[in-house]
Image: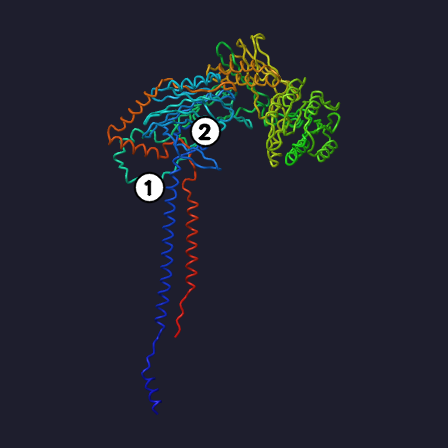
Amino acid sequence: MFKQTLLSKARRNRVLIDYAPDYDRRYRRRKSSTFLSVIKWVSILGLLAVSAFYALPLYATTHNNYSTLDEVGSGQLLFESSETVKTNHKEKRLYQSAILLNSAASFDINGILATVTVTQSFLNAGDNIANGLYTFPLPENSAVNYLKIQIGNREIEGKILEKNKAKKIFNHAKATGRKASLIEQHRPNLFTNKIANIAPNEQITVTLKYVQHVDYNNGEFSLRFPMSITPRYTPTNPEYNANIDENRVTSALSQFESLNKNNINLRVNLNAGVTLNEITSPSHSLKLSNNHLNGEPVKINVGNVQVPMDKDFILQWRPTPSSTPQLSLFNQTLDGEEYTLAMLLPPSINAITNEVSNTTVSPKTLSSFARDITFIIDTSGSMQGESIKQAKQSLRFAINTLSPQDSFNIIAFESNSHNLFNQTQMATPENIVKALKFIAQLDANGGTEMYKPLASALTMPQTELQHSEAIKQILFITDGAVSNELSLIKLIKNTHNLPRLFTVGIGSAPNGFFMRKAAQFGQGSYTFIGNVNDVEKNMSVLLDKISRPALTNINVQFHPLHVGNIEQYPKNIPDLYHNEPLIIAFKTAQKPTSIQLFGDLVNDEWQQEIDFSNANIKNKNSGISSVWARSKIEDLLDGLVIGKQPEIVKKEVIKTSLKHQIMSPYTSFIAVEKEVLSAHELEERKQAALKALKRSDKKASQHKMANKQLAQSSTLHASVFPKTAVGWQAQLLLGLLLLILSLIWLVISNKKTTHVSV
């Protein structure tokens, strides 16, 4: 009874607790906490990503204010710095770019020759006297022949002198306090010249002149002038901007407002020598003085007075298509001597095709000469591996392109030589099969006895089935790994009725000297194939060229017949090939009244005469004589190959080089300062410049801040800078990676739930 009473009492006093609302509150609290945690971490990571996005570029700009010589893409004046950058385990010096004030370039184009004059002005916006380096990227096949640098009252002029004399002048200039420097090349086709002691706020004006051959491809001439600019990255730095009072620097910047565009003035005088279909530019708008394009010179203005230097200037002009070769003459009188440039343009394939479209004869037959061609393939031990594979593939490709009107033979050589036939045979299907089997059995082994197979090819008997007027050609496939180059070149030089010799360089490092000179003396061309994947492309271009000469057996005649001494280059005129103009340079004691050229077309004879009253007469600075001089120097140096006395050759090369201001192995381009500056005078000048800057603290501060802003302005620099200054891709990836890691951590932490038991 007692127990039951106590139990009943306990039951009556029992309190029931409902935990459901508490669980619900805790669940909502945990859910809210998780959401807030995600927001918190995402915010933190976002702040980190934003910080990285802004902080890393600011770090990068400490290097991006500088550039290396490898990044030069237009004419620039660079200041030396102590900064370096390591690339491919090498340290390269970094330079700061001077402010470009203005630029101008003029182009005097005569046929395939262009004389380019570039003038640029720069400013040293720094606080100290600086040493500068003027750089300009030169096009291929170009040569500098004039340089002038104006710095205040100082003038530096570049001249070509004999090397020993140039060295003496250089040493004497240094000893007397004058500035002098020899022109150098940092990389192929990059002109550089040092300029010392440029005072603060001093202007530097550079005038550079060079001569170049314009490009000709698919019936179109083209010229490219480098002037592209990649703007440097300018950071948004609140601390830096806060320290600049724009009202204080406005007056200091006002003098540069009109220069804040990096513009250039471009003018062209185009004398094509032939009638033109069109003159165009894919890069800029053009204004022509003569829209008739009838062969008269055309003056061309580019843009509206000036154009931005944000891309290279490209000029293109296309001659009117012709089914026969076109002859143009350009004449220059210099020191009482006459220099004439004859430019022979090949006929247009399309014009030939249209002309014979109504005949029953195929255009291929009317545009192709019959050929008697001998292939020489090097199978010596030096050709083992990839080289022999490329050589055999090249030869197979060449054999398969022969036409039924061609005759051919193959000579393979190592220590001994092996001929496919005793004489050339017609390119019948049966003979083609024999040739392919012969090629398949070839292997690289043995020595390199090149003299005997080359001599055999030069005198190879021709099958009686071939036309007597067929063009004799030799295609020589080798790596040129021989030590008797001179005897081989003499063999080619002394061969009577020399076939056209074309060389194909195989392997990673063929003997370029021998290959080029052999082709030059053989009135052919040199083709380099360094990769097995390029065999078909390179051989296709070469074989298409040599299979269809446009004009052969070319000769020249002057009227009157007696014009005094005649020096002509090349001495032996090669054939005219499609897609490749032919240039012949003459020097005569008297001006001819006319020049006449003769030659053979496929099924006809050809001749054209031009009266000198219709020739393009040029002034002494046109550069026509330089083409002749460059060809003469090359011919004189070739004399060393065939045994001429070195001292006689050297004397003639120096004489020609100095007269025409053309570089040679025996001369140097030296720049000498005309104003004499002793060490004491230089120190006085430096002190005077520094005093002028410190004369007014307020004015000096304004100039300093103005110059800093100018130096960091992307539109005031004609300079190429690294394109990866911001590096946003790496920063974005870093931010995304951190975000993913944080989300993974949150998911893992959410799995650790708290269980409550009753």
**SS state under label 2:** loop
Give the position of the C terminus as an image quadrant: bottom left
Q: Please tell me in which quadrant of the rendered image residue 178 appears.
A: top left
Disc 2 from disc 1: Cα separation = 33 Å
Q: Residues within 10 Å of mark 2 (few under 14, many from 20)?
A: some
The number of callouts visible is 2
Q: For this rendering, which residue is in front, 90 or 97?
A: 90
**Relative to 53, residue 457 above or below:** above
Please give the name of the residue rendered at 57% of the width and 18% of the height, measured from the top-left corner.
637
Q: For this rendering, which residue is in front, 198 or 328?
A: 198
Of mark 2 and mark 1, the one earlier in the sequence is 2
Query: Which residue is most to the bottom?
Result: 1
**SS state under label 1:** loop
Q: Nearer the viewer, mark 2 or mark 1?
A: 1
The three-letter amino acid code for the residue at tag 1 is Asn
**Relative to 756, residue 137 above or below:** above
Give the position of the N terminus as an image quadrant: bottom left
Query: Residue 237's mark?
Result: 1
Q: Which residue is mark 2?
A: 226
Q: Residues within 10 Å of mark 1 (few under 14, many from 20)?
A: few
Q: Position of residue 186 (x, y in %)?
A: 47, 28
Q: For this rendering, which residue is in front, 614 or 625?
A: 625
Q: Position of residue 409 (x, y in %)?
A: 71, 27
Please give the name of the residue rendered at 27% of the width and 36% of the height, measured from the top-left corner.
246
Query: Residue 121's mark?
Result: none
Q: Is residue 605 left or right of residue 93?
A: right
**Relative to 42, residue 231 above or below:** above
Q: Position of residue 112 (x, y in %)?
A: 52, 22
Q: Position of residue 547 (x, y in %)?
A: 64, 27
The three-letter amino acid code for the residue at tag 2 is Pro
Q: Is residue 692 left or right of residue 59?
A: left
